[in-house]
Amino acid sequence: MKTIHKVGIIGSGKMGSDIFNYLSDFNYELVWYTRNSDHKDVLKNMYQKKIKRQLKHGIINKDIYDFRFKYRIIDDINNLSECDLIIESIIEEHDVKFEIFKRLEEITKPSCVLASNSSSILPSELSNDNQAKNRIVGMHFFYPIPFKNVVELIFSEFTDEIIKEKSKLFFDDIKRFYIVQNERNAFILNRFLLQIQIVALNSLKKYGLGFKQLDEIAKEFIPEFGLFEMMDHVGHNTMYNAIMNYSKMDSDKRKYEPILNKLKAQKTISDDQSGILFYDRDASDDIKEISNEVKQDILDSIKETATKYIKTYSEEFQVDLYDLKKSLNEFCGLII
């Protein structure tokens, strides 16, 4: 039985927009919140042009067009009060998210599922109210949503069983493969990839390679994106905050120091020179030829790390091995 009919989305950045656009193809009443009044009008015009084109080219019929034309794009958060599910997708900063959830606790009905698209902040950390925590979950989508058929669905010890069931039914309805996690094994896909990125950084230093040069080697095993390219794409500040959060979930915190220091140094450079990325630095690097033996050594270290953490995470975190492997394949193209 369908229990979610009205869905709210908070955030009009890349992920918020992608979530809205993906859900707009399903039979939900959507309400999209942005704090920026001027941006609201831009988003509304863009969306209406999209569905008009769909109608014109026969992708949707008039009934679907009329239904989707009624989707609301708003700049008053109070208009989310009647939603059955709200998905937050804003800046990856705890205090900002915390304030949003505090407001949602005040204005929404008790049955509303409150979800965060955070890639590193646990659901239980988004409220100090144990009564509110029972309806807060993590729904970590991966970008771009149409091509990454996996979501990390994260429940805390406080999450109500009805809220869990509603969340699962929602993903069944929108045809998303999801991997259920608790707060101990949360964000397992990014944490898995991070172990490989740590090894890759060590190899980069060992052999004096450029970032893009190492990525080209790693893509023979992880084809969807480069290890450092991914960090540039996400943003160094966001990556730094996320890795700090991941390190707190691990007993061995020292292994994260090299990559945190590298990102911290990049952040400092970016303060003075806007937009300096790992790939930008390659332009001034003296990229040298490397032997097949070195390439193979790098690939072997990456493969060994992947094999190790597939086994470690599936056993230690009691994650279904099939689900983990399928999720990694959807996330980054890894086949193991």
Image (cartoon, helix red, strand yellow):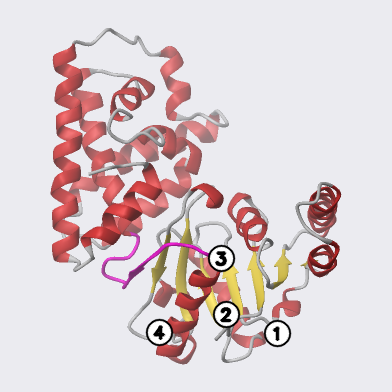
Q: Is residue 186 visible?
A: yes
**Front one among 5 and 73:** 5
Q: Earlier in the sequence, mark 4 or mark 1?
A: 1
Which residue, given by chain and number where applicable, does mark 4 sit on? 159
Would you call the spot at circle 3 few (<14 residues within 10 Å), some (14-19), or many (20 or more)?
few
Give the secondary structure at mark 1. Answer: loop
Residue type pointed to by label 4 = Thr
| Spatial separation of the CA atoms under disc 2 and disc 4 | 17 Å
The quarter of the rendered structure image containing the C terminus is top left
| Spatial separation of the CA atoms under disc 1 and disc 3 | 23 Å
Which residue, given by chain and number where applicable, does mark 1 sit on? 82
Give the secondary structure at mark 4. Answer: loop
Which residue, given by chain and number where applicable, does mark 3 sit on? 96
Does residue 261 show up magenta in the picture?
A: no
Label pair 1/2, CB-CB below 8 angstroms: no
Which residue, given by chain and number where applicable, does mark 2 sit on? 102
Q: Which quarter of the figure has residue 102?
A: bottom right
Q: Residue at x 62, y 82 (%)?
A: 84
Residue type pointed to by label 1 = Glu
Q: In this rendering, which labeled residue sits more in front, label 1 or label 2?
A: 1
| Magenta-drawn segment | 175-187
The quarter of the rendered structure image containing the N terminus is bottom right
| Spatial separation of the CA atoms under disc 2 and disc 3 | 10 Å
